[in-house]
Image: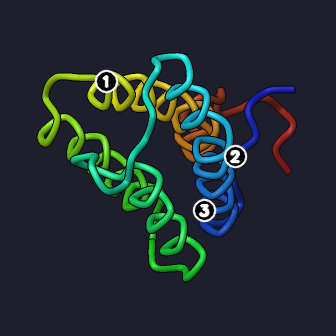
């Protein structure tokens, strides 16, 4: 086992895409359902799905140079919710999604990206 690192930035970006896809497909609907939040794009201060979808589009168009750039844009969506809707369910949804997203990002992008730092330097298996 052990932690395997990314050999290219492209691999890291693929991981970002997978995370965002999982958040959009699974976590947004589930979190809204759990908290009893019914999204209404016309009335909500922030349309979370649409905002995340536009981040996904930017990923598909290779507009992010690093996972950090991607992370910053997703965090901006949560921050927008917290600013625009400081109380109410949208705020709670954003908090919960933010936590989930950060856990996924840390596990699937941050750690592999810094895998060399988590590995002992000489384990004898290096060529």
- From the image, tell me which residue sits under label 3: 13
Q: Residue 104: horizontal and vertical position, in percent?
A: 58, 33
Q: Residues within 10 Å of mark 1 (few under 14, many from 20)?
A: some
Disc marking residue 6: none
Please identify, in this view, whether the residue under mark 1 or under mark 2 is nearer the observer: 1
- Residue 87 appears in which quarter of the rendering? top left
Which is nearer the eye, 89 or 107? 89
Total marks in image: 3
- From the image, tell me which residue sits under label 1: 89
Q: Residue 110: horizontal and vertical position, in percent?
A: 52, 40
At a point 79% along the width and 27% down the height, the residue shown is: 2
At a point 65% along the width and 30% down the height, the residue shown is: 119
For residue 64, side relative to residue 80 (left or right): right
Element marked by disc 3? helix
For the residues labelled 3 and 1, say whether their Cβ atoms are less than 8 Å apart.
no
Q: Residues within 10 Å of mark 2 (few under 14, many from 20)?
A: some
Looking at the image, tell me whether mark 1 or mark 2 is earlier in sequence order: 2
For the residues labelled 1 and 2, say whether their Cβ atoms are less than 8 Å apart.
no
Q: Residues within 10 Å of mark 3 (few under 14, many from 20)?
A: many
Q: Which quadrant of the figure contains the N terminus?
A: top right
At a point 32% along the width and 22% down the height, the residue shown is: 92
Element marked by disc 2? loop
């Amino acid at each position: 086992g052990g932690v395997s690192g990314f050999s290219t930035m492209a691999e890291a970006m693929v991981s970002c895409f997978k995370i965002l896809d999982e958040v959009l497909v699974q976590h947004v609907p589930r979190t809204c359902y759990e908290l009893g939040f019914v999204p209404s794009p016309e009335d909500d201060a922030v349309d979370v799905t649409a905002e995340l979808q536009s981040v996904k589009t930017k990923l598909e168009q290779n507009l992010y140079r690093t996972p950090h750039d991607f992370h910053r844009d997703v965090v901006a969506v949560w921050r927008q919710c917290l600013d625009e809707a400081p109380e109410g369910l949208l705020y709670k949804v954003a908090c919960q999604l933010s936590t989930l997203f950060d856990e996924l990002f840390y596990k699937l992008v941050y750690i592999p990206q810094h895998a060399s730092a988590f590995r002992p330097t000489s384990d004898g298996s290096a060529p």
